[in-house]
Amino acid sequence: MLNFIYYPVSFILWCWHWVFGKVFGESSGFAWALAVIFLVFTLRAILFKPFVGQVRSMRKMQEFAPEMQKLKKKYPNDRQRQAQEMQKLQSEHGVNPLGGCLPMLVQIPVFIGLFHVLRSFKPGWGEVYFFDKQGVDSFVNAKLFGTNLSTFITMPADQLATYGTERLNVILLSVPLMIVASIATHFTARHSVARQNAAALDNPQTAIMNKLTLWIFPLGVLAGGFFFPVAILLYWLSNNAWTLGQQHFVYKRIDAEEEEKKATVVETRQALAPKPGAKPVNPKKPAPGAKPANGAKRMPTAGPSGAPKAPSTDAAANGNSNTEIPGLTPGRSTSKKPGSKKRR
């Protein structure tokens, strides 16, 4: 039914086992342990870009979280309208809520596929997906510190006998892995919670999810270690170690990008703003006696008292006054109206 998951997972595991088997030997427990760890690294490398998109999406959602709270208050009794407005707001900001869940949604089927494939490696079995009988026998006979990777603490004694493993060896290897995986899960969640703003922390739903990821999930890993095979504990530990390192790298890079954007905005504002103490620049007044620009009217020159000068006496006496009366053509007498003729 889920062969579309089992075959790809077993193929990646087969590839890495082939690589490390050349170094440590095909039936080496270190070769199989490294194959499981690098299966995780391969998957997480493929999901690196979606993880970056998830972080950016969460950052944007934190920025317009107050607007979403306003929509909830505006439509408290209309859930459908509230959801429509929120979707519209998210599309305006370029946020896809499903994109943030993609890395987790992909890891769940991989975890299920690896768990099923490893549980299928049993003594006397033939081919298991991409592994032939020789590959299955190699895994069954491989031991890491005296423990087979398919065994777990609560496994029945008769099944432990078929693997040739004692329960004490399983406990000595599984308990440290359980503790370290649980601590890594807690610190991964703490690193993520530390990125949340005050508005997100005040949200009751967010507070509940933070408590679950900080305490319940690590305790779940610790309790599940009694029932998980050693290989699954290796998967969980390497997955959380990768997540913790990836978060540190991605968050640091995104913070640097945002600081660079803020610095650019500040520099642009400082470049456009006037310097401290500088006087504002006014347009230059024309020099005395200079001709006005094309289309500009010449203003009368002010006299000593500040009023415009009257035409000179000589000019008035000679009839050459510059004063013009609207409706009259220069040089005509005011006693005659323009266009009047003597009738005969």
Image (cartoon, helix red, strand yellow):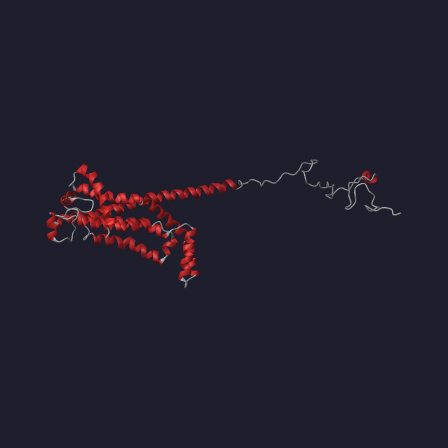
208 in relation to 39, above or below: below
Disc count in the image? 0
Image location of residue 291, percent across then percent down: 69, 36
Position in image of residue 160 (x %, y %): 12, 50
Task: State the residue at coordinates (52%, 41%).
Answer: 272
Q: Residue furthest front?
A: 344
Q: Does residue 39 appear left or right of residue 332 in this picture?
A: left
Residue 274 image-quadrant placement = top right
Across and down, in percent, residue 210 comes to: 32, 54
- Can residue 181 be seen by looking at this rendering? no
Q: Which residue is painted at 29% across and 46% down in the image? A: 243
Quadrant hosting residue 242:
top left
Q: Nearer the viewer, residue 55 or 131?
A: 131
From this viewpoint, which residue is outermost toward the bottom?
A: 77
Q: Position of residue 99 (x, y in %)?
A: 35, 50
Q: Quadrant of residue 258?
A: top left
In the picture provided, is 45 more to the left or to the right than 291?
Answer: left
* Residue 31 visible: yes
Outermost right residue: 344
